[in-house]
Amino acid sequence: MPFLKTSSLVTIDRHIVEEGAMHPEATGELTRLLRDLTLALRIVAHDVRRAGLNDVLGLTDDVNSHGERVKRLDIHANDVIFRAMERGGHLCVMASEEVEDLMHIPQQYPKGKYVLVFDPLDGSSNIDVNVSIGTIFSVYKRLESERTDAGTLDDVLQPGYRQVVAGYAMYGSSTQLVYTSGNGVDVFTFDPTIGEFLLTFEKLRIPQRGKIYSVNSGNAHKWPQGIRDYVTHLLKPSADGLRPYSLRYVGTMVADIHRTLHYGGVFMYPQDATMPKGKLRLVYEVNPMAFIIEQAGGKASDGQGRVLDIVPTSLHQRVPCYMGSFDDVCEVEQFLVNGEQS
Ligand code: P6P
């Protein structure tokens, strides 16, 4: 288990400033961007915690760009993040799972050199039954950092290896913020009594191999042969006791990835007969999580190659997703190759 920090009293603000100090060229703009973002996350966390009380449960009449009925809390979280970020002068454009097109900075506010993409409330199908949900985010530098006009789609459709920061907030038994800026993965736990995110795990490392696989087995009849063979393999007891694996699946990517980071194993959303590119979205779900998993020493694949090397072609494109412990994901890729050859 990673080193638990209990006495450092490092707030996320101080951590970001200390990390910024490691980059002499840093202007402090990213620090201020992240300070605005953590404010938004604190507000969303507060509203999620009161979801049953402050009349934000239930469906709207809206359907998002993926044909999914939108929960009111989705829209609320999206609006909170946009309003918290629009005026700081750090961003040239934003993009969200909940909005079909780019979200432009209003003309009265200055534009900055960063791009923010986010899934405001991941796991919305779990909102009404009090199962963990979360917010996923990712920050890029715009392609031409000296420009001061509105950002473009090209600024958003960058390959994941160009991410400057990625992270997620998980609204579970506590609210935790998991964050990387390319210098390892740090975990902050929100203390509502003082209103601060405090550093609780530093430089989190995912186990080289785990004993848990995480996938929606309801889709098994549609999986590629290689994935069916892989899961059959995981369930076959082995002499060394490494198998069988256990199945754990929350149905909220943030929660399933959070457990995989700590305990190891593999999280999968495969392509299948009805979803040839899987279900999860590359830009604001899979890429941020892939950056975090790699920074923790794991591996993130689309089944054929590194997720972070994929050059996006559209804002809401989906991608098959296999990520977690390095050895487990290598094994998945091998089964997919074998499945293709059988
Ligand atoms: P399924 C939630 O709606 C989500 O986008 C991810 O958070 C989660 O991993 C996935 O979809 C669950 O999808 O088809 O298993 O319900």
Image (cartoon, rainbow, N blue to C red):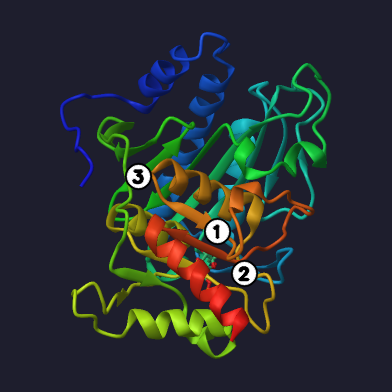
Disc number at residue 176? 3
**CB at disc 2 and ligand 1 closer than 8 Å:** yes
Q: Position of residue 167 (x, y in %)?
A: 48, 42
Q: Find out if the beta carbon at label 1 lies less than 8 Å from the nearest ligand 1 atom.
A: no
Circle nearer the viewer, 1 or 2: 1
Q: Residue at x 53, y 80 (%)?
A: 226
Neighbourhood count class around disc 2 (C-alpha, 10 Å): few under 14, some 14–19, many 20 upward: some
* Three-letter residue code for mark 1: Ser
What residue is shown with label 1?
A: 301
Confirm or deny contact between disc 1 and disc 2 (CB under 8 A). no
Q: Secondary structure at mark 2?
A: loop
Please tell me which residue lies in front, 132 or 249: 249
Q: Residue at x 44, y 14 (%)?
A: 22
Rendered view: 57 above or below 113:
below
Cα distance, mark 3 to mark 2?
Answer: 25 Å
Which residue: 69% across, 75% down? 276
